[in-house]
Image (tube, coloured by chain):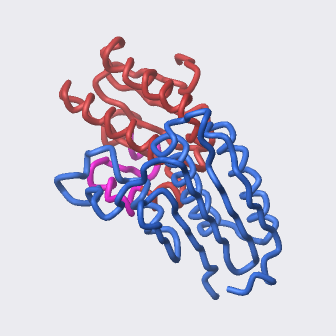
Chain colours: A blue, B red
Amino acid sequence: MVEATWRWNLHQEIPSSKDAAHEAIEHLLHAVSDAGWEGREFFHIQMAIEEALVNAVTHGNHESPDKVVEIEFKVSADAVYMRVKDQGEGFCPEKLPDPRDDEHLECTNGRGVMLIREMMSQVQYNEIGNEVTMVKRRKKD
Amino acid sequence: MTDKRRVVVAKVGELAIVRFADKKIVDSANIEELGEEMFSLVDKDHIKHVLLNFDGVIFLSSAALNKFINLDKKIKAVGGILRLCELKDDILEVFIITRLDRVFDIRKTEADGLKAFGAGS
């Protein structure tokens, strides 16, 4: 992806609060909509950033006023890049139980991470698991 | 018809039809409240069967899914049935991807849901 193609970007640190997270999400979704994303793909972007950012604020930073979440968003007509980094201890996404397994179907953890993987074109965690980078590429008609 | 903060409930005998006040079920405080209001139907109002009507709901998070899973467990514990209806395609896809369509009995319309309960026309 060539950065010159991005039509909107945002890189900042936000407080570890759900209000701040949702304000950032609203900014992103506004830009995503302005770039012409709609329908199912828009929904997928909304789902991924909601799950990633709320995870960072609540499970990563435990809503600590002493910690921030770093966000980096880039939006074009063809792709959306989202990076979220908290200041928590991280986690190993591979070790989460797959909530789609019969024995875990009614468990209440791991579903957000799985939804991100299913709905994004590309997902990558850093080594300690406190940063997730997600890319959604628009499907060609 | 009973109005709470997060849901609107219509009771028909042991069955409650539950509609949601929020178009987007994401705010964690609201989701907690939603859970309490849904659970109280079983715990306090002794409702046995619940039909969740998702008409108007355009987005929900995994935290909301967890509340529905816990509601389902609570209803099964009293020998009742939870059914879902009127899900938009995007929302239905979430249930399919997570395979929760295997846990929940999902019907297309409210009329279909009521029919499955043996209620309605």
Residue A70 image offset from top left, x and y in percent? 64, 54
Magenta includes B107?
yes
Q: How many marks?
A: 0
Q: Residue furthest top?
A: B44
Residue A51 image offset from top left, x and y in percent? 52, 52
Q: Is residue A43 above or below residue B28?
A: below
Tell me the residue at 56%/64% (across/down).
A44
Relative horizontal placement of residue A115, taking residue A17 as reference (left or right)? left
Tell me the residue at 63%/87% (across/down).
A140
> Which image quadrant for residue A115?
bottom left
Q: Is residue B47 above or below residue A74?
A: above
Query: Residues in magenta?
Result: B95-113
Residue A25 image offset from top left, x and y in percent? 68, 51
Relative horizontal placement of residue B58, taking residue B80 as reference (left or right)? right
Q: As rendered, which of B94 and B2 lies closer to the eye? A: B94
Q: As rendered, which of B48 and A132 lies closer to the eye? A: A132
Question: Which of the image's four quarters has the N terminus of chain A?
Answer: bottom right
Q: As rendered, which of A55 and B12 lies closer to the eye? A: A55
